Image (tube, helix red, strand yellow):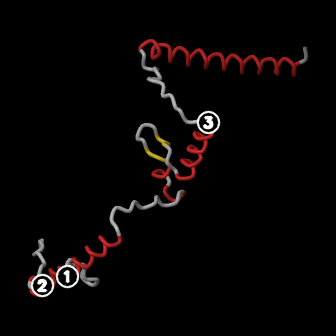
Amino acid sequence: MSHRQQQAAFRRTSTLNLLLGALALGAATLAPLAQAGELDAGPVAHSTASRDQVRAEWQAAQRSGDFVVNAETGQTARQADPAHYAAAPAVITKSRREVRSETLQAIRAGDMLDAETGRKLNELNPRRYSQAPGVRATDTH
């Protein structure tokens, strides 16, 4: 056997020994945990969704960033890197009529902010808004 062949055989043997050592260390580390029951997978969830449905849901989650990237904190990809994903769609809880009605009421009550000072109009001019008919007095704290 030539010197090069001996070196190649030695490298293969060393790599194999290193791999076997790592496997033995891993087994030795995990064995007590497995015996203590800390590696239980827990209850297995069974789904009635088809493979195609699951695949479609996973692809949608990847596009929207709605999948967990940090199991310890429960952080999603969207939370970890918001610039990478489009903004989440806003959830509409009020009708246009309700919003318009509330806005008109706030205008009448002086609950709108002054653009220059950032204070409410009813705080800047309390006499004007305290006399408006059908308007409740608001806190001026």
Alpha carbon of mark 2 to alpha carbon of mark 1: how far? Answer: 7 Å
Label 3 or label 1, whichever comes before in sequence order: 3
Q: Residue at x 57, y 52 (%)?
A: 63
Label 2 or label 3, whichever comes before in sequence order: 3
Crowd band around label 1 with a 10 angstrom C-alpha radius: few (<14), some (14–19), many (20+): some
Q: Which residue is mark 3?
A: 51
Q: Position of residue 50 (x, y in %)?
A: 59, 36
Q: Which residue is mark 1?
A: 108
15, above or below 121, in the image: above
Q: Position of residue 129 (x, y in %)?
A: 13, 84
Q: Position of residue 55 (x, y in %)?
A: 61, 41
138 relative to 89 in the view: left or right = left
19, above or below 120, in the image: above
Would you identify the image quadrant in which residue 140 lies?
bottom left
Q: Residue at x 16, y 84 (%)?
A: 124
User: Quick check: marks 2 and 3 in contact, CB under 8 Å?
Assistant: no
Residue type at mark 3: give it. Answer: Arg
Residue toward you, 21 or 103: 103
Q: Residue at x 50, y 17 (%)?
A: 30
Query: Under tag 3, what secondary structure?
Result: helix
Crowd band around label 2 with a 10 angstrom C-alpha radius: few (<14), some (14–19), many (20+): few
Q: Quadrant of the C terminus?
A: bottom left
Q: Position of residue 99 (x, y in %)?
A: 31, 72
Label 2 or label 1, whichever comes before in sequence order: 1
Q: In the rendered structure, find residue 132 and report the number of the disc placed on it.
A: 2
Residue toward you, 25 or 64: 64
